[in-house]
Image: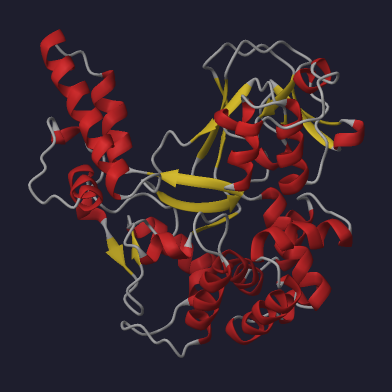
Amino acid sequence: MGDPKIEIRQTGDKGRGLFATGCFSDGEQIFQEIPFVSCQFAWNEDYQYQACEYCLRPLETAVENVKRLTMNEFVELPHPELCTINKSTHISCSLCGVKYCCAECREIAWNKYHKTLCLQKLHRDNTHPLEQLKEVWKEMHYPPETTSAFLFAKIFAMIHQSDDKDAIKNLLNEFCHETMNRDQNITHKLVGFKFAEQVETLRQLMLTSVPTESAQEWATPEGFQHLLALVGTNGQGIGTSSFSEWVKRITAMQLLPEEKAIVDNYIERIYDNFDKGVGDFLNNEGSGLYKMQSIINHSCRPNAVINFPNGNFQLAVTASRNINPGEEICISYLDNCILSRSRHSRQKILQENYLFNCKCDKCEEEINELDETSSDDDEDLSDE
């Protein structure tokens, strides 16, 4: 694996897991990884959250980002030089106008999948099969989004363009596989109650949108459902924001106490205005498949967290406490709000979304709790 401090082991009921073979200190980075494939969410893109088509790096400067989200053209930011977005490197596909943060990203995308997926037109053509695929998906999958039909299109295109098609397919096969019954449950979560009809609609559109001859095992009705379930099980959300990167940088600056107080207050007011305008939808959002990250199991008492330190799709797993050799590295599949709920509530959400019963230390310690969900939890769960 190249890193002597981590290794993959079989873990019985949980399958594979990632374990520490050396010590990690609280805050120490365990590894970084770019995805096998990733894609911005369809609704997120249509609502003008501008990101590089390949790496999801923001294409707006921090101040442009704030102006759009607050709908206030007169907003200014102190120390604008802390924004990391370099618009002079931005470039588009000359054939279809898709935007990239740099020529390198455009070249990688073209060589991996975009040569196949390029619409070959600078104006939007709603009759194109790929545009129809996107619109049908949007009708099935409203925000908050968890994946995109274009992710599946990219997978087929990558196999089609690859000189080593078996290597791509073998890598896909390394991701978690489920039984057909579990596939159906996961797919149901992705596309809703009419999932059988909707999955077939998606499959037919996919067959007319991208070449599938080299990946027939995923082009059949059963195979396509399996591919959806694979992404539903293993997909990792990605969030990027030029403003949040600016916030991290200015927070790290050595400011005089008076200026720091002014800046902190200003940032708080901006976030308040975001909340009034766009709520929780602050970031360029997408999802991706990460080979190493997908091996990491869940714990309700995790010892690691996921972040995106480079402002793009590159993921980092960082220790959230000291980790000793031999310990399994675990993240939480649940957010902090859900982690604070009762054992029964956590188990219910994990079973519905990931189809497993958690047996982590925290759940085992709380096993004698009444199998009831509190009234507050019930109200929250009904909103999800």
Task: Give the residue at the far front of this rendering.
Answer: 375
Please determine whether, in this image, residue 109 is positioned above or below residue 276: below
Task: Give the residue at the far left of this rendering.
Answer: 74
Task: Give the residue at the far bottom of this rendering.
Answer: 127
Q: In this view, does 231 lie to the left or right of 217?
A: left
Question: Residue 310 at x, y = what percent?
Answer: 41, 37
Which residue sits at x=7%, y=47%? 74
Closer to us: 331 or 253? 331
* Residue 212 figure quarter: bottom right
Q: How is the image coloured?
A: secondary structure
Question: Residue 77 at x, y = what percent?
Answer: 13, 36
Q: Is residue 218 visible?
A: no
Closer to us: 200 or 339? 339
- Of the 4 image quadrants, the one containing the N terminus is top right
Question: Residue 137 at x, y = what percent?
Answer: 56, 72
Which residue sits at x=57%, y=54%? 146
Question: Residue 58 at x, y = what percent?
Answer: 33, 50
Please determine whether, in this image, residue 131 is positioned above or below residue 296: below
Q: Can residue 273 be seen in this view?
A: yes
Q: Is residue 103 left or right of residue 40?
A: left
Q: Is residue 384 left or right of residue 108?
A: right
Please determine whether, in this image, residue 127 is positioned above or below residue 221: below
Q: Is residue 38 left or right of residue 216?
A: left
Number of numbered callouts drawn: 0
Which residue sits at x=92%, y=32%? 12
